[in-house]
Image: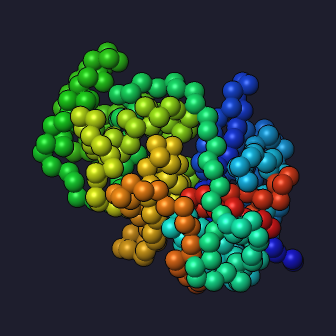
Amino acid sequence: MNLTGFISENTPIIIKEVHDGIEYIDIVPISDVLNLNNIYKQTIDTSNFCFQNCKVDNDVFVWADNEWTKILHISAYPNLIDNKYPKLIETQKSIFMITNSHKVILDNNNEKKIYDLNMNDHIKLINYPLNILDTIESIDAFLYGVVCRIGCISDQIYNELTYEKLNDVWEIYCKNKNINYSRFSSLIEFYNKFNLHVNTSIFYDSHGKKIPKIILNSSDNIIKKFLEGLLLQFNNNDITILKIPLISKCQTLISGICYLLERLNIDFVLESEFRDIGLSYAININYIQKKSKENKIKKITPFYEYKGWLYNLTTESQMYSCGIGKCLIRN
């Protein structure tokens, strides 16, 4: 068995789908690719502990070197059969978990295998794709942001005033939707009420919380409202004044937040750390407001504890962007 480079199963990728002639951007774990418009119901059988390869017959595209490239195949195997322990690569603007055989694109467009990477190597930053559909109201976007944070964003900013203001927003939402309004005293209670009227499956992938596709494809004004809800910032506050890092173990969620911050031209720095909840990721907003163009490697950590599946994509261009942030890899 000749295994090339692989990445961890929950690594986020940016994909493009087409529904009824309309294009949508989404951010999903690499392990979820075969669930996207899969009319042939192919799958990776994770109960079968062996190398597997599937042809992707549906038209799904992944973001690569500032362009879309079609996904042709997806391969996977459990790390238990080969012990190709991935490395956690952390730069200022990206975090990804990857095995040694992959190549990463540097900022001078040269390629370098993972096992040759050095501290202070500069990883290339690609541009994000842009798609604007705007099919959601501002107040909906705000509450979507609140739902995204519940159980996933670690901080201590809740107080009676927070719940009072959130109840005011909920009351306006209920009036607009002709829903019977009743107050709540906790975010979980709010979530249970909201769940009665909105299909909350749009907030989840197979590994946890994510940014709903409808938000990723919205205008800057809608994105700002969503982030205000995510950060529990009321009265059109400047979201860049929040000096508490956003911390979550959900890679897809953190990747989506990075995408939204970039859309609003808000600078940030990424960090990873092992906490009580496991490997977690933190977004620190850059308050200097001078956008850094550097993306040098800060940490290279062998992840010997990783026991999950490892995945890889074969694309038409042989490249794709993956992980939290905007790095670019090649097989």
Q: How many numbered badges does the structure rendering display?
A: 0
Where residue 281 sits, quadrant-wise, is bottom left
Would residue 109 appear left or right of 238 to someone viewing this image? right
- Toward the viewer: 243 or 279? 243
Q: Residue 18: in sight, yes or no?
A: yes
Percent x, y of residue 214: 53, 34
Where residue 174 sits, quadrant-wise, is top left
Residue at left 20%, top 51%? 158
Which part of the image, by quadrant, shows the C terminus? bottom right
Residue at left 56%, top 75%? 297
Would residue 305 appear left or right of 70 to someone viewing this image? left
Percent x, y of residue 68: 75, 45
Residue at left 43%, top 74%? 273
Percent x, y of residue 23: 68, 32
Q: Residue 208: in sight, yes or no?
A: no
Q: Give above or below for 301 relative to 196.
A: below
User: Looking at the image, which residue sits at the far front?
Assistant: 290
Residue at left 32%, top 46%? 239
Which part of the image, by quadrant, shows the N terminus? bottom right
The colour scheme is rainbow
- Toward the viewer: 96 or 291? 291
